[in-house]
Image: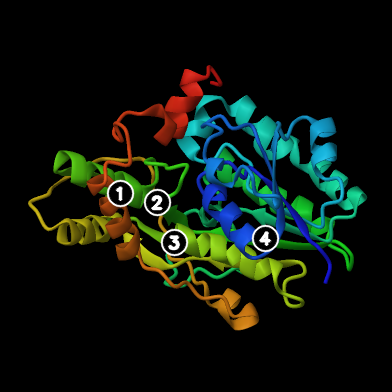
Amino acid sequence: MEKRTVVVFGGGGYVGAVLVPKLIQESFNVRVFDTFWYGEKIFNNLINNQKLEIVKGDVRDSNAVAGALKNATDVIHLACISNDPSFDLDPKLGKSINLDSFPELVRLAKKSGVKRFIFASTSSVYGVKEEDKVTEDLNLNPLTDYSKFKMQCESIILEQQSADFICTILRPATVCGVSPRQRFDLSVNILTNHAYNTGTIRVFGGEQFRPNLHIDDMARAYIHVLNQNKNVAGEIFNVGGENLSLDQIANRIQILINKDIRVCHEITNDLRSYRVDSSKIFNKIGFKPKYSIDDAINELCDAFNQSKYIDSLNNSFYFNIKRMKELSLG
């Protein structure tokens, strides 16, 4: 059996920190390529594992990228400025990382002999949709530069699809749950953090529907695609778990924390609202989420009970935009 080496660009981030150990458990050799803006200790428990290689680098550095791709068989591309507020902090920086670096990275991957390339797009490319089921064949309506550039990267990678360079695009829902590189700037995580630690949930809007996905299921989806021998070439898959309004998420948190939680509603200009249908990825390759949003909320509360986080409401390591400001990146 061929020994496969997966390069995970952005592997030191929120999802990558959960994905990488799972890839190693699946017997892949893993090369993590990341700037490690949020710290380099997340893989300390794997530091002596011969299947893991850490490369500190920037996707805008083509020489570093070319070096990281040497002898690689697969790429999972997670690297980006990863949410709209962080992106808006410095649009030029965001564009340079999220879009400008991408064509050259894809070219180098193909040139180096990579056989599989999985690109992490976003379900926010759909923008505002009234349909009950937003499927992959609907027109895209990205509302921010972040999602517009993701849409453009989708076109770039699909143009390179070939029999010996299999490209697959995943459009993840908003991910939630516990990670070694924890984030508290994602909807379920934000609301749970505030509910547990302040007794108050601030809901911006409330009626907007968003797809949500447990972080373990997100990692499972990448591995599932890697393990497929057919039905993934040139394909785009939504990867979502539960479509919930922000009010519904707040209500679940109130129930699960089981104490008086006050919900405050505030006005927002973030009008994104859509219900993603993820039946295609199940029908074509058999992937189905195993975990619920309730699981993510309960796991976060367990982590709070165990005092795993230091100042979860303010610590910059849990908030992309705070950390970027701290590093003078925007």
Judging by the rendered image, the residue that carries numbered circle 3 is: 213
**103 or 39, which is in the foreground?**
39
Res 293 → quadrant: bottom left
Sequence-wise, the earlier of marks 2 and 1 is 2
Per the model, the C-alpha gap separating discs 1 and 4 is 32 Å
Sequence-wise, the earlier of marks 3 and 1 is 3
Sequence-wise, the earlier of marks 1 and 4 is 4
Per the model, the C-alpha gap separating discs 3 and 1 is 19 Å
Per the model, the C-alpha gap separating discs 2 and 3 is 12 Å
Sequence-wise, the earlier of marks 2 and 3 is 2
Judging by the rendered image, the residue that carries numbered circle 4 is: 169
Closer to the eye: label 2 or 1: 1
Judging by the rendered image, the residue that carries numbered circle 2 is: 178
Q: Residue at x 82, y 52 (%)?
A: 72
Q: Residue at x 61, y 62 (%)?
A: 25
Q: Is residue 148 visible?
A: yes
Q: Tell me the element at label 3.
A: strand
